[in-house]
Image (spheres, rainbow, N blue to C red):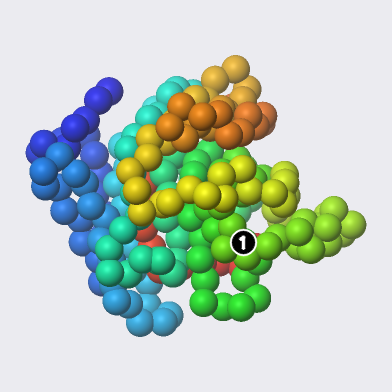
Amino acid sequence: MFDDFNERNPRWRLRHDGVSRIIIQDSILKLCMGPTEALYYSNAEISDGSFDELIWSGGKLSLKARFTGNGYPHYGSAGFGFWNYSMRIDLSYPIWFIYLRSVRGSYPLQGFFIQVGNRFAPIMLTRSIGIYKALLTLFPFAAPIRILSSKPVMQEIDLGEWHTYTIDWSGGKAVFRIDDREIADVSVEYRGRARIDAWLDNAVFQP
């Protein structure tokens, strides 16, 4: 499937909550937000199905994206990739690129990551996670996540510029690329189905 966003494709499900909107114009789909008030959830999201009609059990997703606007750097989360379930941690298995930034000083994962299930690997960090990774290695049951590396693979990336992001999910693994540069190869233990999802919201949840 290919979409250049010249117009709205009925295959996509669009959702926006709170102070947000979705614009399709000049072959660009824009997920827009803000400013939003604390404790009031806002979200702009596009997906290719509901959680009751998942169609992907593997596949290759490639898209061009950038993070920009008056609200950048954005405080909240944003990303794109494959996702199988909503917010229940025990059932959710994302395979995606995810941006996380919080004004809460205690939130450890701040930057741009790949995530497969509960495993994270940093692409770009706005805060070091070395101490947090060491603590999770010593006390693996302290939080329901794993950090694969504390060293970002593309710290120099400018998220405000256009980049091509690719996820190739097949054969029990997911290969992540940015502009044809392979940045991660992660095993996928999930054997079910997923949908394609891209979102922007104002929420960052404690791990």
Q: Is residue 132 above or below residue 23?
A: below
- Please identify the quarter of the rendering in which residue 60 is found: top left
Indicate the amino acid at tag 1.
Answer: Leu
Q: Residue furthest right?
A: 138
Instruction: Using a 10 Å C-alpha cutoff, classify the residue at mark 1 as few (fewer than 14 neighbours), some (14 to 19) or many (20 or more).
Output: many
Where is residue 126? Give x, y as percent: 57, 63
Tell me: residue 202, above or below residue 183. below
Direction from residue 204 to residue 153 in the image, left or right: right
Q: Quadrant of residue 175?
A: top right
Q: Can you see residue 115?
A: no
Q: How far across and how far down the image is residue 94, in percent?
A: 53, 42
**Residue at 51% over, 66% down:** 101
Q: Taking 11 as reference, is 60 above or below it? A: above
Look at 63% across and 29% down and name the residue there. Answer: 185
> Which quadrant holds the C terminus?
bottom right
Which residue is rendered at x = 36% and y = 66% of the image? 72
Image coords of residue 26 (percent x, y): 11, 43
* Vertical placement of residue 207 versus 9, above or below: below
- Residue 188, image x and y in percent? 63, 30
Q: Is any atom of residue 61 visible in this view? A: yes
Nearer to us in this view, 102 or 42: 102
Point 51% across, 60% down: residue: 100
Q: Mark 1 sits on what residue?
A: 109
- Classify mark 1: helix, strand or loop: loop
Label total for image: 1
Where, by quadrant of the figure, is residue 110 drawn?
A: bottom right
Q: Quadrant of the N terminus?
A: top left
